[in-house]
Amino acid sequence: MRKLSKGLVNNKQIIFSMVLLFFSLNLSAQITHVEPPNWWIGFKNSELQLLVNSSEIGNAIPEINYPGVSISEVHQAHSPNYLFIDLKIDASTEPGTFDIVFRKADGTSFKYEYELKARPKKPEDYIGFNSSDAMYLITPDRFSNGNIKNDIDTDLREQKIDRTDNYARHGGDIRGIINHLDYIDNLGFTAIWPTPMLTNDMNSSSYHGYAMTDFYEVDPRFGTLQDYKELAQKMDARGLKLIMDMVANHCGSEHWWMKDLPFTDWVNQQETFETSGTLRNSNHRRTTNQDTYASKVDKRDMVEGWFVPSMPDLNQRNPFMAKYIIQNNIWWIETLGLAGIRQDTYPYSDKSFMSTWASTIMSEYPNFNIVGEEWSTNPLLVRYWQAGTPNKEGYESHLKSTMDFPMQQNIISALNENEDWATGFVKMYEGLAMDFAYTTPEDILIFADNHDMDRVFTQLHENIANTKMALSYIFLIPRIVQMYYGTEILMQNTAQPDDHGLIRSDFPGGWQDDAVNAFTGLGLSESQADMQDFVSKILNYRKKSKAIHTGKTVHFAPENGIYVLCRVHGDETVVLILNKNEEAKELDLIRFKELNLEGKTLKNVVTGATVTWETHLKLTEKGPLLLTTKNEL
């Protein structure tokens, strides 16, 4: 073979080197994950920690050349496939994109383009939910199928749509919610809380959303990130607030990092998991968070136990995990312009971390709000988690709102029981009296039911009058209100109590072939349509009622099967009379003299009829009577 000249060899080497350099510098496909996938300028906290996941990335040296952005520290993980990069973002930094160049020991390098955005609005303009709000809680898979093209994704494990199976996916999605914003708005709701809509690439029961396998990705069976943004924007245009359901306690067992965990303590009981040992479930003894006598083993099993075997328990004591969760939640607030967060399984996470988490978010967004799920029926335990509440250990949660499971239980018990000295309405009366224990009771979230408990119509033995009394009461007391989709049309799970799949039944009319359509009223029974109208009338009045939002609360001890509660603000007085009597009853109004209603005309919020407040009021039927001094409803 003829020899090549030295110059030609050198030229080929140069060309080859240039091609190699071009190829390596543009090989961002080597990067599997960079999280958060983008960030913003202008935060109080100028620090950002990037999780970078790529084969053998751990030994790479990252470099950034962008004005105002510097690398303060680089952390290698236990796994060689991760790198954690601490960035410092100066206040003077301009929005834009820049390359993160990764140089490896073998001389190769590659880059990843990263973007810093301008924040879409001022931090104080993220207005959270409050006592003027009523949330509509939706399980998206069961609400409405707005886009049948995304029902099945062949890249995901569960590839079945079966509406006859309570635990399969049914096809509801983000487009289905968007399509029915008119319905939700017209009912009188001011906020929507969908259960999680991030990717749950699990083998079964992925519909509920609480086993995330990617914290930065919208489940494609619900739609796209653009769909989620569209939902947020269209809600905002209507004055509706979007609440995002987040999970700091656990992920799904098929999360992408579970096959290659970055650190030896990324999840709790990690050694047991990695050696296929027997994992401990949580003991669910939530009182160990407050119990001064609690043993170390009980505390450990509460916080470190897995919620269920398919949900690995995240270790928030690992500082990288802690930053990951906080940054992820901030990313979603900015991306969607959220008005609030509902934090799942609140007391199961490390409580020191949860304090830092809430404090960090509320510091960045001073008018924001977060509600934590504490499923305890003792108001002392609910009280403990609310911001500003003194306790012996000096713990400060920074959590503005928690969920009122104690009052929910009191309402159900009161309406199911016969009236006696210690049973019946007195449970509601004394339950509300416990508000003295709360720092700000009006910041607590009340509900008649939710996605994890029997439908309220089932809990109340399908008694319509009692269901109306339950709803009118939660709509009136000093609380933030939440109602589960379908309660307005008496959805129930009586055939199978405690069956979560049945509790989360399809909303009629959400699918094209549905014979009944609750959105239009087609096929609803008389009682369903009546309840829908009842809810709408009261919630639409509630929207405009200063008395219900911020007014003084007065209630009167139950007598003769009647319980009276009142809200007063200026010249607006709202009176709720709950009546268990099946026969007509004369209510002596002299007892309520302090309300200063003598001779005044009050309007029935539901029917529009008027009554004059004199010496007696005839109650003609069992159920609630809601009256207001306002002439216009």
Image (cartoon, grey):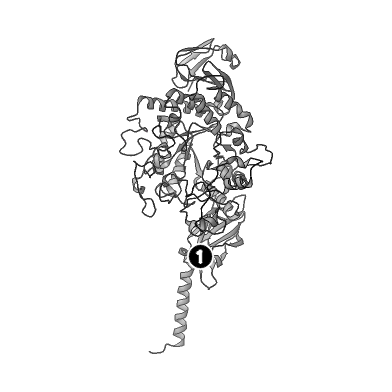
Give the left or right position of residue 556, taking residue 225 as reference: right
Residue 401 falls inside the magenta stretch: no
Of all residues shown, which one is farthest toward the top? 615
Residue 514 falls inside the magenta stretch: yes
Task: Name the spot of residue 385 as percent of width and height, x first.
Answer: 61, 39
Closer to us: 239 or 307: 307
The kind of residue tagged 1 is: Lys
Residue 573 in sight here: no
Task: Name the spot of residue 276 as percent of width and height, x first.
Answer: 49, 57
Task: Name the spot of residue 148 as percent of width and height, x first.
Answer: 34, 45
Q: Give the residue number, with chain letter if any, for mark 1.
A: 111
Give the left or right position of residue 533, taking residue 372 as reference: left
Instruction: Identify the residue at horizontal 36%, vertical 50% (top origin).
Output: 159
Vertical placement of residue 377 versus 116, above or below: above
Closer to us: 37 or 428: 428
Q: Secondary structure at mark 1?
A: strand
Task: Name the spot of residue 316 as percent of width and height, x first.
Answer: 58, 51
Instruction: Identify the residue at horizontal 30%, vertical 34% (top origin).
Output: 515
Task: Give the residues drawn in magenta, as a range.
Answer: 507-518
Q: How many marks?
A: 1
